[in-house]
Each structure stands twice: as C-alpha cells, then as structure tokens.
C-alpha cells in the first residue's frame, strides 16, 4: 500500500470510505511526519490529540454509516485562525499565550465536516510578508533546495509559508491559508503545490485575526486542484457573523470539475509582461497558454492598463487597514502585557501609566515589519495626507476593478505567472522591504478587485525550483478558475517533489 502520507485529501476520504485504512492510522502517520520535520519549523504548535480525536470519531462514523465530507482527513491550520482552547498567535509575540474562547467560522466548518487538526501553522507575523521571515517564532524553511549548488535555505513564500511547506513536505494533505495580497498563491507557487483564494466574501472572516479587512480572504492549499476544491467547498458559505460574507449558495465545485476548455477564452494581460521578466517565468507562461489551447481554449490578448499602480495602492490600503485593525492590541484584552516602561504606574498622573503600558506592550510585542506597516498606515490616514494617499489609492483600486471588468467582457479567465521569480534564499530580501513587496506584483491586482485566483504548479526553473501559473477568474466563478487550473495541472504533469533532507 502507498504510504498514507502520500495520499491526497480525496484519496484519504475515498480510501477510508472503502475501508482501506482507518482514520486513526492516517492521523498517526501524519502526526509522525509532523514530529519528524521540526527542522522545517512549519508548525508553531502541534496538536496531535485533536487530530486523533477527530480520527476516532471518523472511524466510529464509518462504522455507523454517518461519514462526513472530510472524515479521516487531518489538516493544518494557519495560526491566523482562532481555534477554541488552542493557542492562536498570528505568529506575533503580542499574541503569544492567547487562547481564544471561540472558534473561527471557517475552522468550525472544517471540524463539522469531520476534519482533524494536526497543528497551528507558522506564518509571517499578522500575515505581513512574502517569505515567512517576519514570524516571531522563526522563519519556516522550504523543503526545496536549489540545484544551483549553493545549498542555500530557501523561503517557502509568505505569508502562508508554514501551510505551503507542510503540504509540500507531506506533513499534512491540505492546509488553510489566508490571502490579502497573494499569501496563498505565492507560497503555493514557491513550493510546487496548488492554492486558491476565492472571491472576496466567499469565506467568513469571523475569527480570523484581521490584517486588512477589505482584502483578507481564507482559502485552501493542497497538492492538487481537486483537493483545493474539496477543501474550499467546506470552508466557504454565508456567515451572519461577517457583514461582508456573501449570501450565495456554495456550488459543488468538486463535482463540476471539468478540464475541457473548448469554447473558453483565456486572456493574457500584456501589462504583466514586465521589462526584464525572468526567462524561465516567461517560458512557463507561454507553455501555459499552449496547454490551455491544447485543452480547447482560445487565447486573447487583453489589457489591464492600471496594473502598474496596483502595488503602490495595495501598500497604502493594506497598511491603512492594518493600522486600524491592530489598534486593539493594547496589553489589556489579549496576550502580552509589558509593564517594563510602566514602573511605578500608580505614581504617574492619571492616564500616563496606562499610556506607558500600551507603548511598552506594543514596542515589545510587534515585530519590525508590523511596526513599519502601522507607521505607514497611520501616516496615510492622517489629516493632510489622507486625500493625497489613501483617497488616491482607493480611486486606483476602483480603476483596477474596472480594468478586470472590461477584460472579462472579452475572456473567461486570465492567465499570468503567480510570482516574478522562483523561491529566493532566506535573508536575500529581508533587508529591503521594497524588493520584498515587488514579489506580490502579479498577485495583488486580483486581491484589490476581490476576484478568485489560484496558483497551480507548472514547471521547474533552470535551478530545479517550482514555478506556478496563476488563473484569475470573474467574481463568483471559482469553478472557471478551478477548471482552468485542472486543465493546466493535467497537461503540466508537475510531479517533482523536494528531496527529503529534514
Ligand atoms: N506579501 C503581501 C504583504 O506582505 C501579502 C500578504 C498576504 O496576502 N497576507 O502584505
């Protein structure tokens, strides 16, 4: 029999249903992989007991004939999702030790569907980053090594780097991610797995630590397109507790998967062909277009004229919202409280001791990138600068959404590279925030427009590292995105994997 940890979500579900193995065997196999891969630092917290309890229930449900959609499937949860009774940190010192008394709506749906939790996955602090180097709990390592002879440790991408690394290294068959400006798609591309960010509002944000509320979306990361569809089908759905939650039925995405692209038009946006685009990336993009043509699609040239303003607009809007959302971490309500600057609190004039405690807590609790974003956000929202920066960025956001609306009058889906390069070495860009932000150039426009988008592994770079293709779809058309993703997956035949060194 194949190793249980080699199975996909659908493979586990179907094999368990058929009686090929027990759910307890699956949970134990994955928990052993997790424990054996601590060198990757993919998990902030391991929860093998949670996975085991769900597995016991799944085995009992099988005997009783009451199996659920994710019975026997153990998964990883990004540490941005509040999990009842289980520490939730957003990879920040300021939330260290915070044990939520509630469960996020998305994770609750996963548990209700029978899944178990292997642990809480490492990530960039408050989901701010593209390399997982901003985590308070240390960076995650990609399981991949470059064939360039350097043997350098590589970034797994971010901010869902723990999710990416864990799925690629077979520590879990699937994981939750969140995507504000690429954090599901870029790490998926860096480690050779698939990941989908649905239309804004498909998944409830309730109980997910907020970064930039108008952009944040949960989504699934898994080894193939089918698994992404299975997971997302459980995670999505209306939630009265989130005012921006879409009140739409969740289609049967898995059931309607179809790689036949006949009659479909695929747009290739000319503005994404950046000057000096990496040769491997350009070649993969051309090959992707050919694969979709082979699947029956017609390729059309499209224009998204405001693409070049997307990144600057994102890096105003996201920090602006973050500065507001992160005001709640004050040392009173959650996690860390630092009194070091507040010595002699009772001797201070009224209010000063409290201010000192806030300041000390936030100084000690937030990492450098988080502070940078709070400062940028506070600046662009301040009187005198608001119109020059924030209002302008919002106008650009509207223009970008309009670009997509125009483009989708001519095509069904859009094909682009996911990221402008393969995974880079840890440390290579951490000193240069702008170089790091540039990594999001292809991912951010779809986020600003609230559109569904996914990354599918498509090729290896000259140095033997995975490269991903991105499909962007119309609002609410996750099916079109998944179907084009499946057509790419079938033709790319990507089956490379990281050699085990951990
Ligand atoms: N890398 C982007 C940022 O740092 C996107 C992060 C995300 O999608 N959570 O903001």
Image: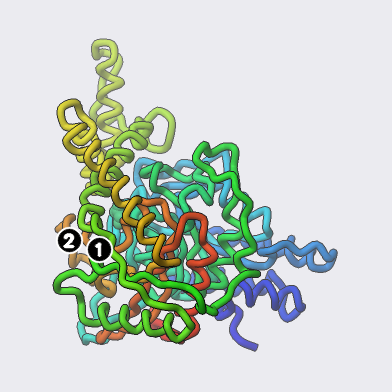
Residue shown at 25% from the left, 30% from the top: 359
Q: Quadrant of the C terminus?
A: bottom left
Counting from the top left corner in percent of width and height, residue 66 is at: 80, 62
Counting from the top left corner in percent of width and height, residue 123 is at: 38, 57
Counting from the top left corner in percent of width and height, residue 447 is at: 37, 54
Give the secondary structure at mark 1.
loop
Q: Quadrant of the N terminus?
A: bottom right
In this picture, residue 199 sits left or right of residue 103: left
Residue named by callout 1: 439
Residue shown at 32% from the left, 40% from the top: 322
- Does the Cβ of the disc 1 residue fall within 8 Å of ligand 1? yes
Q: Is residue 357 above or below residue 323?
A: above
| Residue placed most toward the observer, 33 or 404 | 404
Residue shown at 45% from the left, 59% from the top: 474
Q: Quadrant of residue 342?
A: top left
As drawn, the residue found furthest toward the right would be 64
Q: Which mark is residue 345?
A: none
Residue named by callout 2: 435
Counting from the top left corner in percent of width and height, residue 211 is at: 37, 44
Label 2 environment density (alpha carbons within 10 Å; few <14, some 14–19, many ≥20): few
* Way the structure is coloured: rainbow
Say if mark 1 contacts mark 2, CB within 8 Å.
yes
Q: Is residue 218 above or below residue 380?
A: below
In this picture, residue 161 sits left or right of residue 343: right
As drawn, the residue found furthest toward the top would be 349
Residue 219 seen from this side? yes
Q: Ligand 1 quadrant?
A: bottom left
């Amino acid at each position: 029999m194949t190793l249980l940890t080699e199975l996909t979500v659908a493979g586990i579900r179907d094999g368990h249903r058929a009686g090929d193995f027990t759910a307890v065997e699956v949970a134990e196999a994955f928990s052993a992989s997790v424990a054996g891969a601590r060198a990757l630092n993919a998990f902030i917290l391991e929860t093998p007991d949670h996975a085991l309890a769900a597995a016991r229930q799944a085995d009992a449900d099988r005997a009783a004939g009451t199996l659920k959609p994710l019975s026997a499937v153990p998964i990883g949860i990004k540490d941005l999702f509040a999990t009842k009774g289980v520490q939730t940190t957003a990879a920040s010192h300021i939330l260290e030790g915070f044990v939520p008394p509630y469960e996020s709506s998305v994770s609750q749906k996963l548990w209700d569907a029978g899944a178990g939790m292997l642990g809480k996955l490492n990530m960039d602090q408050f989901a701010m980053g593209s390399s997982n180097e901003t985590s308070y709990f240390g960076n995650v390592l990609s399981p991949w090594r470059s064939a360039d002879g350097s043997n350098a440790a590589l970034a797994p991408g971010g901010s869902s780097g723990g999710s990416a690394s864990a799925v690629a290294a077979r520590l879990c068959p699937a994981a939750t991610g969140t995507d504000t400006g690429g954090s599901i798609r870029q790490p998926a591309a860096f480690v050779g797995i698939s990941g989908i960010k649905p239309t804004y509002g498909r998944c409830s944000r309730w109980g997910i630590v907020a970064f930039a509320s108008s952009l944040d979306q949960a989504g699934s990361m898994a080894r193939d397109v089918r698994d992404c569809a299975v997971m997302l089908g459980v995670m999505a759905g209306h939630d009265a507790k989130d005012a921006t939650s879409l009140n739409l039925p969740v289609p049967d995405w898995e059931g309607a998967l179809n790689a036949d692209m006949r009659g479909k038009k695929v747009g290739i946006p000319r503005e994404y062909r950046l000057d000096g685009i990496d040769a491997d990336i350009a070649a993969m993009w051309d090959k992707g277009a050919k694969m979709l043509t082979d699947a029956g699609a017609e390729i059309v040239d499209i224009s998204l004229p405001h693409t070049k303003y997307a990144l600057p607009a994102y890096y105003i809007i996201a920090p602006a919202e973050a500065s507001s959302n992160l005001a709640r971490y004050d040392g009173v309500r959650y996690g860390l409280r630092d009194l070091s600057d507040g010595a002699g609190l009772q001797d201070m004039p009224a209010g000063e001791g409290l201010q000192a405690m806030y300041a000390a807590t936030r100084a000690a609790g937030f990492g450098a990138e988080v502070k940078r974003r709070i400062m940028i956000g506070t600046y662009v929202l301040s009187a005198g600068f608001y119109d020059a920066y924030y209002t302008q960025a919002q106008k650009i956001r509207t223009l970008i959404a309009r670009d997509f609306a125009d483009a989708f009058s001519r095509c069904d889906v859009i094909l682009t590279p996911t990221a402008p390069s393969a995974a880079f070495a840890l440390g290579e860009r951490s000193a240069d925030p702008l170089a790091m932000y540039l990594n999001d150039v292809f991912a951010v426009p779809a986020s600003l427009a609230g559109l569904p988008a996914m990354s599918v592994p498509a090729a290896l770079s000259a140095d033997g590292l995975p490269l991903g293709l991105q499909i962007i779809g119309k609002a609410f058309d996750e099916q079109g995105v998944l179907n084009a993703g499946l057509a790419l997956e079938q033709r790319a035949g990507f089956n490379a994997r990281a050699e085990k060194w951990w």
